């Protein structure tokens, strides 16, 4: 359920598609809350009107939002009504947010629903018990403080004007808000691990609700041809399946073969829940100096994509703009991107999957103080959400949670345990991809040792870093002279 008359009308989660959904983008009531006094003034109450309107999902700093307020914003409020379809009344209703920067609180019909902290990860709430038949009102409050040192801000400027490689800030909702209708018992997640060498993919599904007597089926298709199926009974809320395929077509950069996947939750012959997805069969391996995809060494010609748009800032004006960014990069001879200081939205990764474009996933760690363990508290939960959300994308070939973790200006050094724990947690969640703990500077635990050096003298560059070849597999890149790109194999 959607409309071409609202911005960003496309389905926001293309790797897990259900038919019953409602896009809540469009015009919302809006108010900037400089004093963070809105809750005391009762703005969460349904009868309280906000003093402006905004076009969601564009942030208030953007021109596309209709607000264009580029000064610092400490807090914002959103409110809108929606009509619950009669066909949804006996199902559960989930309220999804693509991303809200930074700390969000949500009410539905004045019922407090929940809180989420993190400006980049997607999140959702089950709002069924707060709903009424017919009209309902959802209210969102978000606080944001890019200068606190307590939140990852990425390349959002801490000065009024854009400065250096920091740009206009983003506050509040900046990705699609949407509703989804699901059965009382439904498939809440599906993790897919490809194994092309054994002609199969491993599936792990999580179910919410009563699983007694149910079973899960999955069917794979390649270019509409059925190529595999599997089924398993449910003994708990989690089930693992191996889905063999009769035809192996590998996903490879420039040759992005994809399979369609249909998943059903069954009670005998009755379909309880169904969803559609897709997957790619590809493997990743570090082999000395070689980065191998499907056993073949692939030289990564990557751009550094920071994901900013002149009119939408963090939000692409259209889905076509996301696709066009990749097409421009491919047209210039690149085969991928490091998604830099920002968790990109799922639609971008979808187009990377479709177009055979390599990407490295990163978080927006700049602005977060990691000299103490508090940095881990602020960083790790959202990073886990991002890794879990994006795990299934074949285009994603590695993780880089931190970028250039400089020492603090007061002489305090990074807390190495923060980087080590994030690295080890990432490897525990995803053992299939390499992880760079921090791109440049002070490595603690890493699969690839990379160096950012800003010295203009190539001889100084080599003398400083060549001894590290005895310990690490790494890449060298001198940003200024551009002549020092070379790599060594660990001994």
Image: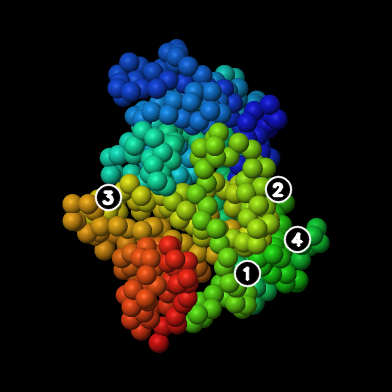
Rendered location of residue 150, percent (x, y): 29, 44
Q: According to the image, label 3 marks what residue?
A: 369
Rendered location of residue 426, percent (x, y): 41, 62
Q: CA distance from mark 4 to mark 2?
A: 22 Å
How many marks are shown on the rendered structure?
A: 4
Return the disc, 4 or 2, that comes first in the chain's sequence: 4
Return the disc, 2 or 1, that comes first in the chain's sequence: 2
Query: Which numbered disc, 4 or 1, marks the residue closer to the eye?
Result: 1
Return the disc, 3 or 4, that comes first in the chain's sequence: 4
Q: According to the image, label 2 marks what residue?
A: 270
For label 2, count other residues whose C-alpha is less than 10 Å away and answer few (under 14), some (14-19) or many (20+): few
Residue 410, above or below 439:
above
Q: Please tell me whether mark 4 sits on a helix, a strand or a loop.
A: strand
Query: Which numbered disc, 2 or 1, marks the residue closer to the eye?
Result: 1
Q: According to the image, label 4 marks what residue?
A: 221
Return the disc, 3 or 2, that comes first in the chain's sequence: 2
Q: Is residue 193 left or right of residue 324?
A: left
* Residue drawn where x is 39% and y is 57% of the image: 403
Q: CA distance from mark 2 to mark 1?
A: 34 Å
């Amino acid at each position: 359920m959607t409309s071409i008359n609202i911005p960003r009308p496309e389905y926001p989660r293309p790797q897990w598609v259900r038919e019953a959904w409602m896009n809540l983008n469009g015009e919302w009531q809006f108010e900037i809350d400089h004093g963070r006094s809105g809750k005391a003034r009762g703005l969460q109450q349904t009868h309280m009107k906000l003093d402006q309107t905004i076009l969601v999902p564009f942030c208030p700093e953007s021109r596309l939002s209709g607000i264009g307020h580029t000064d610092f914003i400490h807090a914002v409020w959103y409110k809108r009504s929606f009509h619950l379809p009669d066909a949804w009344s006996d199902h559960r209703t989930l309220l999804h947010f693509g991303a809200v920067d930074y700390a969000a609180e949500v009410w539905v019909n004045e019922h407090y629903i929940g809180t989420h902290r993190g400006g980049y990860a997607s999140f959702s709430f089950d709002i069924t018990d707060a709903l009424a038949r017919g009209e309902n009102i959802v209210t969102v409050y978000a606080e944001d403080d890019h200068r606190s040192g307590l939140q990852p801000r990425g390349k959002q400027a801490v000065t009024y004007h854009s400065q250096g490689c920091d740009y206009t800030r983003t506050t509040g909702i900046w990705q699609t808000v949407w509703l989804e209708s699901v059965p009382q018992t439904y498939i809440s997640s599906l993790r897919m691990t490809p194994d092309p060498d054994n002609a199969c993919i491993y599936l792990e599904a999580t179910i919410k609700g009563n699983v007694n007597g149910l079973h899960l089926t999955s069917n794979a298709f390649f270019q509409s041809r059925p190529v595999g199926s599997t089924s398993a009974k449910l003994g708990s809320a989690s089930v693992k399946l191996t889905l063999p395929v009769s035809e192996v077509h590998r996903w490879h950069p420039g040759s992005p073969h994809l399979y369609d996947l249909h998943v059903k939750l069954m009670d005998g012959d009755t379909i309880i829940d169904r969803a559609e997805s897709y997957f790619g069969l590809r493997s990743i391996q570090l082999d000395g100096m070689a980065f191998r995809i499907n056993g073949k060494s692939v030289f990564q010609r990557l751009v550094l994509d920071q994901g900013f748009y002149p009119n939408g800032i963090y939000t692409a004006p259209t889905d076509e703009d996301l696709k066009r960014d990749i097409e421009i990069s491919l047209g210039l001879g690149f085969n991928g991107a490091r998604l830099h200081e920002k968790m990109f939205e799922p639609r971008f990764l979808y187009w990377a999957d479709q177009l055979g474009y390599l990407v490295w996933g990163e978080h927006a760690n700049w602005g977060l103080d990691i000299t103490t363990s508090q940095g881990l508290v602020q960083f790790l939960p959202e990073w886990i959400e991002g890794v879990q959300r994006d795990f299934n994308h074949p285009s994603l070939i590695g993780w880089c949670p931190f970028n250039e973790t400089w020492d603090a200006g007061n002489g305090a050094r990074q807390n190495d345990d923060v980087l080590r724990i994030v690295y080890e947690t990432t490897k525990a969640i995803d053992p299939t991809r390499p992880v760079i703990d921090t791109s440049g500077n002070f490595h603690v635990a890493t699969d690839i040792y990379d160096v950012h050096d800003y010295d203009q003298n190539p001889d100084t560059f080599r003398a400083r870093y060549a001894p590290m070849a005895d310990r690490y597999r790494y890449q060298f890149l001198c940003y200024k002279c551009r002549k020092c790109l070379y790599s060594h194999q660990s001994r």
